[in-house]
Image (cartoon, rainbow, N blue to C red):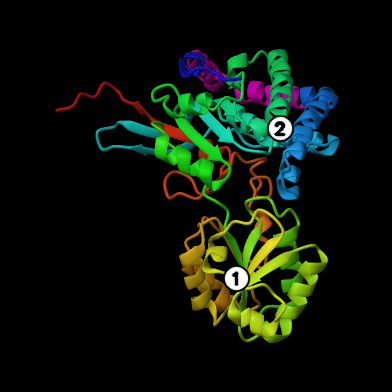
Amino acid sequence: MHIEPTTATDWLRTAATAARDASSALGRMPAEARNAALHEAAAALRRNEPNIVAANTTDIAAFDAAGGTAAFRDRLLLTPARVEAMARGLEDIAALPDPLARTLADWTRPNGLRIRRIAAPIGVIGMIYESRPNVGADAAGLCLKSGNAVILRGGSDSFHSARAIHAALGEGLAEAGVPPAAVQIPPATDRSFVAAMLAAAGLIDLIIPRGGKSLVTRVQAEARVPVLAHAEGLCHTYIHAAADPAMARTVLANAKMRRPGICGATETLLIDAAVAPTLLPLLVADLSALGCDFRADSRARAICPDLPAATEADFSTEWLGPTLSIAVVDGVDAAVAHIRRFGSEHTEAIVTEDPAAAENFLRGIESAVAMWNASTQFCDGGEFGFGAEIGIATGRIHARGPVGLEQLTTFRYLVTGTGQVRP
C-alpha cells in the first residue's frame, strides 16, 4: 500500500513527539523500574512465541516466493529457539549495570565550583534495519535500559515478524507501566516512512542504519539527523607464517561458515606466502566440505589451480554468503596494506603464534575491531558482554565496534556552587 509522504511525515511527527515524552519518563525512572520492564518484555516474547513464529512464517513464504538467497533467508528466519534467545537477550541487558548511574568525571575548580560530567540518554533513536527481525528486540532492550525511546523501521521482508515482536514488547511494557511510545514502528512498509525519519531534525536525535551498503549509503546521503554509521562488513582473516595450522583451520572455518550472512563473517582470507603451499590446500578442502566457494588471486591459483580467478572487484565485495576471496601476501605489512585498500574498517583477525607479528598487525590496521587468534564472528555485542547490540559502528565519531548501552548515552554537566558569581 502506498502512503503519501505527508501522511508518513504526520505520523512521524506524532510518533517522535510521544517518543520524546517517553524518553523523558524513562530517564527519570530508577534502574529497577527499567529492569522490571525488560523482564516483563522478555516474558511477553515467550508468551507470544507462537504468534511471532507464525508471523515469521508469512514473511518466509513471501521471501521464498521471491527467490531470496539461503544466507538472507537465515537472517530472516525466526524459530522458537531464536525467540527464546531474544527473550534471554532482554534479561541479559537487565542484568547489566545502569548506564545512567555513572559519574564520568568529577572535579572542583579553584573558585570552589564542583563540576560533574554524568551519563545521560541521547533521547529519541531512529533505527532503520533490514532482514533480521530480532534486531528490533535487541534495539528496544538497549534503548529502554539506557533511557532512550526508539522508532524501529525494519525491512519490508520482515514486516509481519516485526509487528508481532513489537506487539509482544508493547504488552510487556504496559505490564511494567512504561509508556508505549517508548518503542514504536511505522504502520506500513512504505519507504516514505524512511524518508520522514531521515528528515526529522529536531524530532529524532540519532539515526542508526543497520543493513546493506545501499541502505547505509542512502541514509548518509539523505539524513538531516546525525547518523551512527554501520558500513559493510568486509572482514579479513590473515593467517601468518607462524600460525598454528590446526588453529588456523578451525578459526577460518568458523569465521567464514558459522553464519556466512552476518556482517562479522570473514569475506577475505589473506595467507602468508611462506605457509600457503602446504596450508592453503587444507583450508580450501575444509571450507569446500562446508559448502563454500572461492575467488582467488593468481598466487593462490598457482597452488590450487582449480580455484576460480578473482577480480579486483571481488576483494571489495561483502559476499554475505558462502563465498571467500583469497589472496597470498608477503608478511604482515602486505596484509595490512591489502586491508587498508579493500577493507571497510569493520573487523580483522590475525592467526599467529608470534606476539611481535600480532602486535604489528593489530597496530597497523585501523578497523573498529581487531582480533588475534579468534574468529571474526566474535564481533558481536553479546559476545563482548554488552547483552546485545544495536549495530556495529565503523565511523570515527562517538562509537566504534559493537554499540551497546554505554554507546547509547551522551553526557551532561552538573555544576554545584556556594554562591559564586563570575567577575
Out of 15 and 299, give the one closest to the viewer: 299
> Which range is magenta?
14-42
Q: What residue is rendered at 35% in x and 33% in y?
A: 115
- Up/down of 302 relative to 149, above or below: below
- Up/down of 131 relative to 14, above or below: below
**Please, what is the dominant secondary structure of the magenta stretch?**
helix
Q: Magenta includes 33?
A: yes
Q: What residue is rendered at 52% in x and 44% in y?
A: 214
Please, what secondary structure does the residue beneath circle 1 have? loop
Q: What type is the residue that disc 2 sits on? A: Leu
Q: Position of residue 26 (x, y in %)?
A: 56, 20
Q: Tell me which label, 2 or 1, sits earlier in the chain.
A: 2
In the displayed structure, does residue 404 sit left or right of residue 262? Answer: left
From the image, which quarter does the C terminus lie in? Answer: top left
Residue where numbered disc 1 is placed? 310
Density class for disc 1 (Cα within 10 Å; few <14, some 14-19, many ≥20) is: some
From the image, which quarter does the N terminus lie in? Answer: top right
Q: What residue is rendered at 24% in x and 33% in y?
A: 111
In this rendering, does residue 118 appear at all? no
In the displayed structure, does residue 196 sit left or right of residue 418? Answer: right
**Looking at the image, is mark 2 or mark 1 nearer the viewer?**
1
- Up/down of 213 relative to 133, above or below: below
**Disc 2 to disc 1, how far (Cα)?**
43 Å
Q: Position of residue 396 (x, y in %)?
A: 43, 50
